[in-house]
Amino acid sequence: MALEVEKKSSINRREFFSYLSIGFIALSASVGGVLSLIFRYLYPNVVFEPAMDFNAGRPEAYDTGVDERWKKIYGVWIFKSDGKFVAMSNICTHLGCVPTWLSAERKFKCPCHGSGFYPNGINFEGPAPRPLERYKVFLDATGNAIVDKTRVFRYEKGEWSNPDSYISV
Amino acid sequence: MKAIINYLSDPVFSFTGIIFFFFLGIKHIEVVASKKFATIALILILIIFGWMSLDPVFLSIVIWPDNVPIIFLLALVIWSTWFAIHKGVINDQRMAAGEPPVEGTPENREKVWAWPNLVYTELFAIIAGTVFLIAWSILLKSPLEEPANPTWAPNPAKAPWYFLGLQEMLVYFDPWIAGVTLPVLIVVGLIAIPYIDTNPKGNGYYSFKDRKFAITSFLFGWLLLWIFLIIIGTFLRGPNWTFYGPFEFWDAHKVVAANNINLSEIFWIKFLNMPLPKNIFAREFLGLILVAIYYTFVPVFITRKFGQKFLITMGKARYYFLIFLVLTMMSLPLKMYLRWFINLKYIVFMPEFELNI
């Protein structure tokens, strides 16, 4: 008798598994929902991602010295001197701040920890351990200089003599 | 007068001076802990601070909303440090006279209930803190700036006030050292304090004499290598992260000769008058040896001179870990002085491995 009552009040094996599967589906759905939200969150609505390469115009049109015209858009300084046309990264090699070009002092100076660079990008003061990086530049068929930021040339690795890192003008 | 203060606030002088006054104060701790000294110091600080605030340049730094919490912080740090030392010295004097510390007297050993005694105090503190934060946020608008732009940085670009000490450390070190290694060691060292410091004295009561070394070394790291660096970062660092006196106009075109060179360049080019060797280990051997000496022979030397007592009471593992932490802490002022006096950039300079010390 007692056994029968107990059997009626509790759920049987089949019901238990159907409840379990409902619960498991609900759990997976909620975890999946949260994960998809997190995944969506990783892709912001507005992305500041300028193109990795751009047309910098004719190298002959630039004056000798540092040119800031692409800095605001692409984060690139053009430096022209000694017959070489190079594109420099505007990221400090110490901790990644954005240095300022001080035209009166003729140097780049980082506002975060005071690193200083010569116009050609060589570090000379403050804690920056290495010179500013240079980007690949090349002439396209029409004679315009194309800056390709996906290829980086580092001075301490001896890459500045690589013909891809400058345009002879 | 202002020109003199501007000149003396250069960290070469101000840091040296504050180290001197720190150890002077530790030596004459009874004087520092007296109420008379505190009153005179408070009046002097208020007068000097009031006088300095009359200067428009200094005032503009002080009332900049970012910097207001730093003023609170400084007042709180000075007050709580002094108060703890004051209580400690009173206990030291009592114990020297054979009495128990204040905390051990019968009337202070009386026990009370957490409810309502503690909970009411906490409730009041919560309400007062909330009121204070609301009033503060109404009175001082947060200094919002323009939307972030990855190709532009404000000048000077200052970290939040609690990280200004870290930012100041980064001026003297490679980011891997000052941004990763040293902060990790600071945290590890703070966690390790209860395991290193097995001195049972000073438990449950304030004391200075019983824990002289522990308190001095902690206060050295805290007051001089963190708080003072925050002060430098707040008041004395302007555009391009250049030093400016407290009354000096933040002229972005101030020229400071700071041609920093590495130890390898000093050794090979200046001293031996020859080009840098191609092999990086040959190039950096002097710096590597110096760093190795700093962490091997200096501990041995310190142990010979002062450390025998500690070595016996603490055991080898604890003792050498403590020495390692203290030496690492002292590397910061060491590197700062090397930078100021011989424009040294890195002792070991191996950008090939991102290893610069």
Image: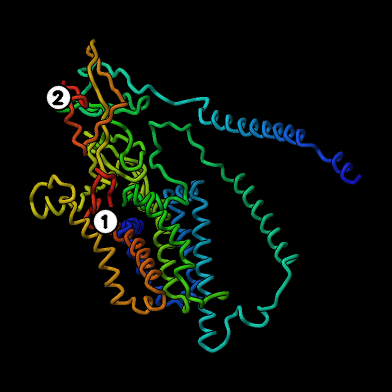
Question: Residue B116: where, in percent of width, then height?
Answer: 75, 65
Q: Which residue is mark 2?
A: A83
Amino acid tagged 2: Gly
Give the residue at x 32% y 45%. Answer: A114
Q: Are marks 2 and 1 on the same chain?
A: no
Nearest to the observer: residue B201 or residue A63 = B201
Question: Residue B326: where, in percent of width, then height?
Answer: 36, 65
Q: Which residue is mark 1?
A: B340
Label 2 marks a residue whose chain is A
**Which residue is most to the right?**
A1
Q: Is residue B263 left or right of residue A74?
A: left
**Which residue is most to the top?**
A142
- Count of labels in the image: 2
Give the residue at x 32% y 33%. Answer: A90
Give the residue at x 61% y 78%. Answer: B103
Question: Residue A77: where, in percent of width, then height?
Answer: 29, 28
Up-down relation of residue B264 to residue B296 (above or below): above
Question: Residue A59: where, in percent of width, then height?
Answer: 22, 19
Q: Quadrant of the N terminus of chain A?
A: top right
Answer yes or no: is residue B255 visible: no
Label 1 marks a residue whose chain is B
- Secondary structure of the residue carrying tag 1 is helix
Q: Residues within 10 Å of mark 1 (few under 14, many from 20)?
A: some
Give the residue at x 36% y 66%. Answer: B19
